[in-house]
Image (tube, rainbow, N blue to C red):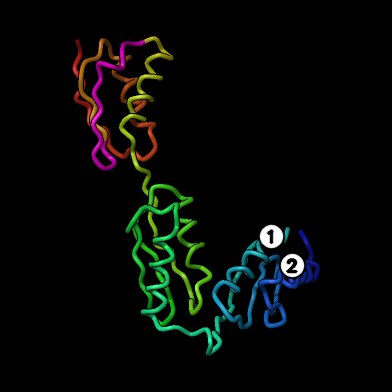
Amino acid sequence: MTPDKNLQAAVAAELAGDPSINSAHIGVGVNEGVVTLSGVVDSFSEKWEAERAAKRVQGVRALAVELKVQLQSTAERSDSDLARAAISALQWTRQLPAKALHVLVEDGNMTLSGVVHWDFQREAALATVRHLQGLRSLTDEIAVKPQINCSAVVADIERALQRRAHGDARRISVAVQGATVTLSGEVDSWAEHGLALQAAWNTPGVRHVHDELRFD
């Protein structure tokens, strides 16, 4: 384990080497590998960058961020202005589905909520608003719920049957509603039946499978 004194020096050097951080206003404490950042920063983005810089240092076992965001008077914005800026920025973010996210701002503290289909979309949303002027904190309440593609389920079932040389996937119908997949149609055997169900369950995002398959 890296000695605390050496770890403290390494974290301080990492902060000082990042041009987006004013390290002169940040204190670094270390106790048994647990690093604490304290002090005052000018923006939420600077706080986030300081946290990210500390995490890059090898030997950090845990990180406590006690940095206070103290906005300069020229950087302060009303909650309504900040909310409008966030909505506009999110609308112009290519990776995000339209109107997928909701923005709540209270005293400069922003919460993003809603549903996206991929984690990279959640990350893109956070990155979009993280550097907005006037932001004091950012809370992530975005849910990631994969979108089930009906053709993908059919393809998975077909591949599973072909690998085991069982039956014909074209005799199986697939219906998708939300996170539920319904299988109907005809199968020749319990083996074919089991493979179809397993393939449906293995599709990302599926939470329920309704079995309406019949034996021919």
The amino acid type, in three-letter code, at marker 1 is Arg
Q: Residue 170 colored magenta?
A: yes
Residue found at x 33% / y 25%: 154
Front position in the image: 23 or 88: 88
Figure check: 76 above or below 82:
below
Quarter of the C terminus within the rendering = top left
Give the total number of marks visible in the rendering.
2
Q: Secondary structure at mark 1?
A: loop
- Provide the residue span drawn in magenta: 166-180
Residue found at x 79% / y 71%: 9
Identify residue for label 1. Answer: 56
Q: Among all residues in the image, which is located at the extreme bottom?
A: 73
Residue 188 in percent (x, y) is at 26, 10
Residue 134 in percent (x, y) is at 49, 79
Front position in the image: 117 or 198: 117
The amino acid type, in three-letter code, at marker 2 is Glu
Identify residue for label 2. Answer: 14
At label 1, counting other C-alpha atoms closer than 10 Å, the crowd grade (few under 14, some 14-19, many 20 or more) is few
Residue 145 in percent (x, y) is at 36, 48
Report if the CB atoms under discs 1 and 2 are less than 8 Å apart: yes
Figure check: 53 above or below 153:
below
Front position in the image: 74 or 135: 74
